[in-house]
Image: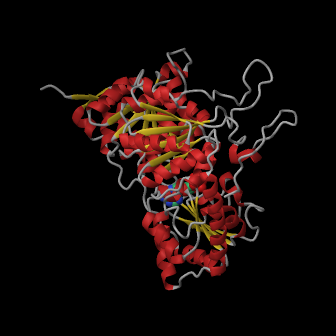
Amino acid sequence: MTTRLTDGFQLVVDALKANDIDTVYGIVGIPITDLARTAQASGIRYIGFRQEASAGNAAAAAGFLTRRPGVCLTTSGPGFLNALPALANATANCFPMIQISGSSDRAMVDLQRGDYQDLDQLSAAKPFAKAAYRIGRVEDVGRGVARALRTAISGRPGGVYLDIPGDVLGQALEASAAADTIWRVVDPAPRQLPAPEAVDRALDVLRQARRPLIVLGKGAAYAQADGAIRKFVEDSGIPFLPMSMAKGLLPDSHPQSAAAARSLAIARADAVLLIGARLNWLLGHGESPQWSAEARFVQVDIAASEFDSNRPIAAPLAGDIGSVMSALCDAAAAHPIAVPVEWTAELADRRARNDATMRQRLTEDPQPMRFYNALGAIRAVLQENPGVYVVNEGANALDLARNVIGMELPRHRLDTGTWGVMGIGMGYAIAAAVETGDPVVAIEGDSAFGFSGMEIETICRYGLPVTVVILNNGGVYRGDEAPTGKDPAPTVLNARARHELIAQAFGGKGYHVTTPSGLRSALAEAIASDGPSIIDCELDPAAGVESGHLAGLNPTSAVARRPARDEIEPNR
Ligand code: ADP
């Protein structure tokens, strides 16, 4: 009788499939090429990229969108290292992701004998991941995958590194014995219910408030507890403010949205319920004068270590957002919260005024176009296509689009997130298209696009319904800084660049537009085509401000010349 054998390659695939992983993002090379082949042959969709950071970013975005870890596959050494920023970014953003990397022979690496692409990858990954594991023998493949999956998704999600040396992938094992080493993780992200007294404490704080406010963060979007969150917001009547990736969890057009009165809401709120949002730099660390010194904070988070990170949390609610919001709804039903009408009227008044200013800005028609005019055109098209996924990165392109482009559906906006990182654009766009099959519009600054631009080829190769709109003002921040010598100024790129030709080079559609009406018709056509395209949108090189809304974070030289800050928007 012949013994049927299997090997490490097949076992990795079997373990992923046993845990419902149906897509892998990566780049092949030594020693994982056959892993990608085996995955594809076994029915896993393999999406091959041009640079590992984009594959990692795609896996992270897939994790955010699906609440299952996205998987990224990398080669040893440099391939592994290229994906580390994405692993770190996933961890910073609390997105579940697993980077599986092939690695060189341990015996060679540990004695530093100079192997091909040798690197102590496990140690290198540790500071950037929620956890890092290495599989040392083929019998442990199933265990390693289960452990990586459980760690990535349970509690506060994050990036997990899983190292598999090439020789382990090649090891053989008797097939029937191997089958017993694979298992499916049961209840990978168990519910965590809040203590009843914590729920009562939180409701007491909110009931005593004169000016309560709810802040929805991307943790709330990730949690997929949309019904319970909406019920609590609407039953309580408390105004809400979405962080950028929580936009659409409740529609931006919702009457309780305080987004268009953001600075007023923050400055005046006397009780704040944070739902899956951290009091980090994106919320001014909760400090005055941005926030009222008197404000009391209630925070819902699965990670209790988050509480008190910046400001005292008067009522911490440790638990998963779905369970906590249901408990809050139940407990509030008996004794409803009443929001003073003066507060909602004050916010409504500011919102109406800011909306009017915004409308006026969007209808201006300067030649050449500026950010607001382009974004007004994009907004009009997206209002007719609310199911489109929006990816957004850049400085001004990010700050202004976040305010101008409203979202109606949850988890339909992906952006630079917790780190404000550039280069996520094409990876996130690819994942959104692959995971959902729906059209994606990536709104990109011309500088931001450059970080992952070669993935246009990936988008075209897989025929993905991704439209990349490049808001091209020819520079980092803006493109009109005068040179001081023979070279372009540090912030200057190429305002005459015709990015649409890149899409055409790979078989996609390309548009070059110079007016809002041209942009509007090109974008409508591109979305309807259901395929890849780039719209190069020529803007005034003088449009934009240095560091966007983050100018305050940028130490300025007393000597260097600074361009005028002429497009700062009222802080909304
Ligand atoms: P934003 O940048 O939108 O403000 P953050 O990334 O700062 O959002 O915060 C997200 C928070 O959500 C993190 O502190 C994370 O621990 C928390 N979180 C993620 N998933 C859940 C969940 N299912 N239940 C509770 N909290 C969660």
Q: Position of residue 515 (x, y in %)?
A: 56, 40
Q: Residue at x 58, y 26 (%)?
A: 497
Q: Quadrant of the N terminus?
A: top left
- Name the residue furthest bottom: 334
Q: Nearer the viewer, residue 366 or 540?
A: 366
Q: Quadrant of the C terminus?
A: bottom right
Q: Is residue 224 left or right of residue 568?
A: left
- Name the residue furthest left: 1
- Name the residue furthest right: 558
Q: Is 25 placed above or below 235 here?
A: above
Q: Position of residue 351 (x, y in %)?
A: 63, 66
Q: Is residue 347 left or right of residue 181?
A: right
Q: Residue at x 49, y 45 (%)?
A: 520
Q: Position of residue 462 (x, y in %)?
A: 36, 32
Q: Residue at x 18, y 27 (%)?
A: 3
Res 122 visible: no
How was this image coloured?
Answer: secondary structure
Res 347 visible: yes
